Image: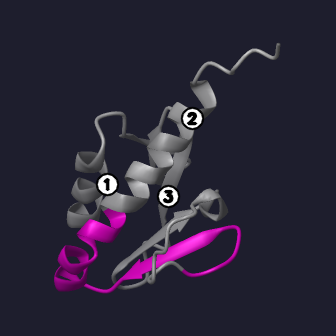
Amino acid sequence: MRRVRDAILRADTSMSERVQYGVTFASSKSGDFAAFVRYREPGVNLKLMRGGRLQGRYPHLEGRTVKRIRIADKREATARAAELKAMVKEWCSLGDAAKAPKAKKT
């Protein structure tokens, strides 16, 4: 879990984490990015509540609207680090786009 957590938090300076209701969340100014779920199962289960907003191609992401990525061990966490970083970057850019000044209609 630590490798996945580090990959997410290092991907963008706006990312942070918090624990709420016993669940660890990774968040940015765009909102909650993901939560670590199913602690009792082996490996890491990361649930992206609004993962359907991501437009990039992420081959290890499962689901339609609520997406999940499962990482079995340290080796897989290292192999998926670039994919996680890309997802975080895209997620953070969604918040930047929402806060950008809108063009005035003339």
Q: Nearer the viewer, residue 38 or 25?
A: 25
Please give the name of the residue rendered at 45% of the width and 83% of the height, measured from the top-left corner.
Answer: 59
Q: Is residue 50 magenta?
A: no
Callout in the foreground (2, 3):
2
The magenta segment is 62-84
Real-space Cα separation, disc 1 to disc 2, in angstroms: 20 Å
**Number of marks drawn:** 3
Query: Where 25 falls versus 82 (above or below)?
Result: above
Q: For the residue labelled by badge 3, is the local secondary structure a helix, a strand or a loop? A: strand
Task: Estimate the x, y position of residue 73 in percent, counting from the top left.
Answer: 24, 84
Real-space Cα separation, disc 1 to disc 3, in angstroms: 11 Å
Q: Quadrant of the N terminus?
A: bottom left
The residue that disc 1 covers is 8
The residue that disc 3 covers is 35
Query: Where 91 falls versus 70 (above or below)?
Result: above
Q: Is residue 16 visible?
A: yes
Q: Is residue 30 visible?
A: no
Label 1 amino acid? Ile
Callout in the foreground (1, 3):
1
Label 2 amino acid? Ala
Task: Estimate the x, y position of residue 14 in percent, counting from the top left.
Answer: 36, 33
The residue that disc 2 covers is 97
Please give the name of the residue rendered at 54% of the width and 74% of the height, measured from the top-left corner.
Answer: 68
Please give the name of the residue rendered at 28% of the width and 35% of the height, measured from the top-left corner.
Answer: 13
Label 3 amino acid? Ala
Q: For the residue labelled by badge 2, is the local secondary structure a helix, a strand or a loop? A: helix
Viewed as shown, does residue 68 lie left or right of 76? right
Callout in the foreground (1, 2):
2
